[in-house]
Amino acid sequence: MPMINSAILTKTFPPPQIDRSEILRYAGVENTTPEIENLIDECLLLIGDKLTYKVCYGNFPLAFSEDEVNLSFTMAKSEKLKANLCGCRSFILFAATIGLEIDRMIALYGKTSPAKGHMLQAIGAERIEGLCDAFNQYIAEEYGYTKPRFSPGYGDLPLEIQKDFFRALEPSRRIGLTLNESMLMTPSKSVTAIIGISDTKCENKKQNCNDCTKHNCSYRRTL
Amino acid sequence: MNIKEYLKDNFIYLDGGMGTLLQKEGLLPGELPERWNISHPDIITKIHRSYYDAGSNVVNTNTFGANLLKFSPKELDEIVKAAVTNAKRAKEESSAKGEKWIALDIGPSGRMLAPYGDFDFEDAVSLFAETVKLGAKYGVDLIFIETMNDSYETKAALLAAKENCDLPVFVSNAYGEDGKLMTGASPSAMVAMLEGMRADAIGINCSLGPKALIKVAEEYLEKSSLPVILKPNAGLPKVIGGETVYDVLPEEFSEDVATLMEKGIRIAGGCCGTTPEYISSLVKKSSNLSPSAITKKNITCVSSYTHAVEFKDSPILIGERINPTGKKRFKEALKCGDMDYILNEGICQQEKGVHIIDVNVGLPEIDEAKMLTDAVCRLQAVINIPLQIDTANVSAMESALRRYNGKAMINSVNGKKESMDAVFPLAAKYGGLIVALTLDENGIPKSAEERYAVAEKILVEAEKYGIDKKDIIFDPLTLTVSAEPDAAKETLSAVSMIKHKMGVHTSLGVSNVSFGLPHRDAINSTFFANAMASGLSAAIMNPYSAEMMKAYYAFRALNSFDENFSEYIAFSQTLTETVTITESKKESVSTSEQGSALQKAVIKGLCDQAAAITREMLESTKPLTIVQEEIIPALNIVGTGFENKTVYLPQLLMSAEAAKAAFEEIKKAMSSSNASDKCSIVIATVKGDVHDIGKNIVKLLLENYGFRVYDLGKDVPPEVIVEKASEVNAPIIGLSALMTTTVPAMEETIKLARKKLPNCKIIVGGAVLTQEYSDAIGADKYAKDAMEAVRYAEEINKKTCRFTHFASQLNFKQASVARD
């Protein structure tokens, strides 16, 4: 078990395996057709090798108090995060992005072909999630047992904590990821999250929607 | 000694990393290092001094993130003052013998500029300007803009430095493993833009170790006429046994950097992970090297935010379609602010393979400066080829050049003093490749020799502004051959003289030559071919003309610009492809089950087929019959399927696109542009919100159903929306918002609409909206998806159309009465 060192590292991943069922889920399709499959293929061809798969991250120590989680660079008032990180000594804070090119393509095809624009959105969502999964796996190999990732806006963790995440990671200069005034990120296909590191194996390891309170979400997985 | 003087005969050594050293001294993650200038001045001074002692000629102040986004004006002033004081103290205390300067360090803002982010370009300029002013006030020797990973932000910072001090400015960018900036710019593109804006030295820092930056460095050295900077990381950080370790050690680092100094790098230092040890090792390693001369590269080019386009022997195509001259539909689009029409012209031309797009939006009745700038900003959000700013209006030219993300082509200057006095200062400030017309106060000279003489005069004047002849491209003017039989010959001869005798590139707008003649394409393309043979470097032309494109590809094939004729063959396939493919696919559509072929094509979302079948049907069927009996029923089938969840959004959209393709054919066939009698709808994404995918979907569907949609785009202020609705007498306004933070802007818009247009119905939609939200902000209708918006619009249309018809007839009568 390595000692905790809060240096911020960056890593570029190879393109994750494409999961067409996830693309369909993000596109809002339950039963696919040859035309939809063609549309996916066309969009994947347009994307080609234009995406980058970059992550920057750091390993931070963790402490709990009465109603707060001490993330070492900030305090988080969140019961849900506290529950998520229960039993952890440290955590990984990371920011991941597949780059600005997908946003440009979505803007372009949003004008010329909304169907492609929509499908590119879905593929972008699948790609960034694929990157996060690959990163998760890498962390599990390097640091031991991991908890499901937890992002600002999940449960009761406020979006405003993005500001602290961005100060700690400086992802704008490391991977080109920036934060807007309204707490949205550019490039849009990006994720910031916390992954708890635990000494013991955790249940519920796979990313799922069970903990989320937004029950009417059209993307909610029914596992 | 002045650093620019010193640079002529010497290497300049920069400092190394600051952040890593501060962490060792106890800087915590998330803590702002700039505050340490005040809280730990001794530590900062010690680090600076150790760099001077190691042999650095320049140290950067500890002000990487010192800007008004992070600090109050008062604290910023204190921080910059303390930072400069620390550096000055280090300079005095250091015992090193070499020349020493202090650079004001400026790093990126951390915000993404619009259109992809929410940070306005001018706000970025002002942000950097404040820091620059403080640095100059407290006495730095130069400005060092570094680690910039976006070309647009780099431009903002350089502009701020140039506008707010007279100090030398060094500009350094951070490249990724793919050899590009995070937002896509290649080294050549950055060199083109930064040289044009007259940085004093340009180069590369951060991101990677020296070996990984060799290619980028070599591209800089090949393209740049300015001294090149190299300030790499000590490789990549790794955590080994709880320690942060960089994987390139001083020995290897200095070896690698010294090798690149031998190849031409003139300004060198280190970035993240490097320490004074790295710098002293580098100084030692390179002590026996002599600095190579900085040579002028004589590259004629323009650039976009991704790449540079160089003018060499193979001709460059400049698309001419964004220009209202002689185009009724384009003028109408300009007048009603239909930006999508203009964007589509840009997108289509890019798809046709032009290298540059001319942008001319001049009309007497519009605010050209605003329109041109808007067009440039929106075009560069969706297309990645360079733009040619085409205007006679100097203030429009300046405001468009300022906002352009790259080195633009400037169209145009001419030999009149007034024109040169106005255009050359702009080119000197913003950079650009200037198209110079060979005419002057005496008009267009008749002979090639006289036009050549005007060209010479223009070059002399340009030199006074420091504009090199590589940044000028002459247009010796195409005249109408039917009016003047020798015109073409004189123009061609001028092209040849300017290219071969003067050694300057040329450009022509070719289409003028055929004016008044039948089959203009034949004359144009032959003239184009002749001009290319005479040495023409670029043509402003119509890329939709097959004859012109044939001439271009054939010329390249014949002059060994096209290896294995692969481009020619690919192009020739596009000439026949459209017919055969539609034939075969049409068959597969029409043979399937029941329903008409057109309905099937729309339902399946097959654009080409829908268009082809419609074209065929139009020969025997009335346009409105096709709409009412084929397209609308097909759309209804898909729409109902969507509502019943048997058809999904991608299919709905594909059908809508196919229907649109069919409508395009129908519009072409109809004499009157008003194919529908449905009402107008104004739609927009509200102020502060930049998401428009959903809104675009709603627009597409509404248009399918025959509504006249005025799409005002995104981030639209309430008064603009309401004004438009009032102007076009729209009974419906559609508003979209994605973020909770912009719902108040939606509410504000609704309030204003209620006040000004009490009868107008308002539909709202977007990711964050719910029925409750919608009720709370007083909308008439919450549409959960595009189909629901269409259904509601149909409902309102039924109620109001009789009234609007009546009203418009009334208006007509009133107008005729007034005329009488």
Image (cartoon, rainbow, N blue to C red):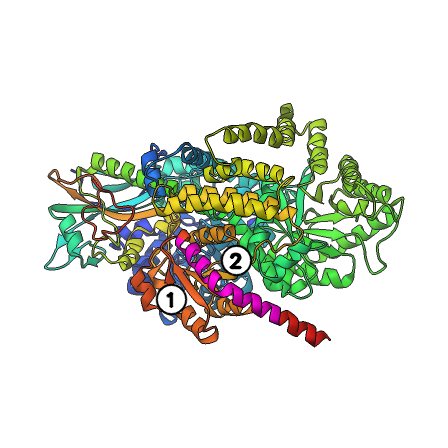
Does residue B773 sit above or below B597 in this rendering?
A: below
Q: Are marks 1 and 2 on the same chain?
A: yes
The quadrant of the picture occupied by the N terminus of chain A is top left
The chain letter under disc 2 is B
Residue lying farthest to the top in this orientation: B564
What's drawn in magenta, residue-wise? Answer: B788-810
Which quadrant would residue B247 be assigned to in this image?
A: top left
User: Percent position (x, y) of residue B59?
Assistant: 42, 54
Left or right: where does residue B197 sit relative to residue B288? right
User: Percent position (x, y) of residue B339?
Assistant: 56, 56
User: Percent position (x, y) of residue B634?
Assistant: 47, 43
Q: Which residue is mark 2?
A: B709
Using the rendered image of the protein, determine whether residue A151 is visible from the camera's viewpoint: yes
The quadrant of the picture occupied by the C terminus of chain A is top left
Density class for disc 2 (Cα within 10 Å; few <14, some 14-19, many ≥20) is many
The chain letter under disc 1 is B
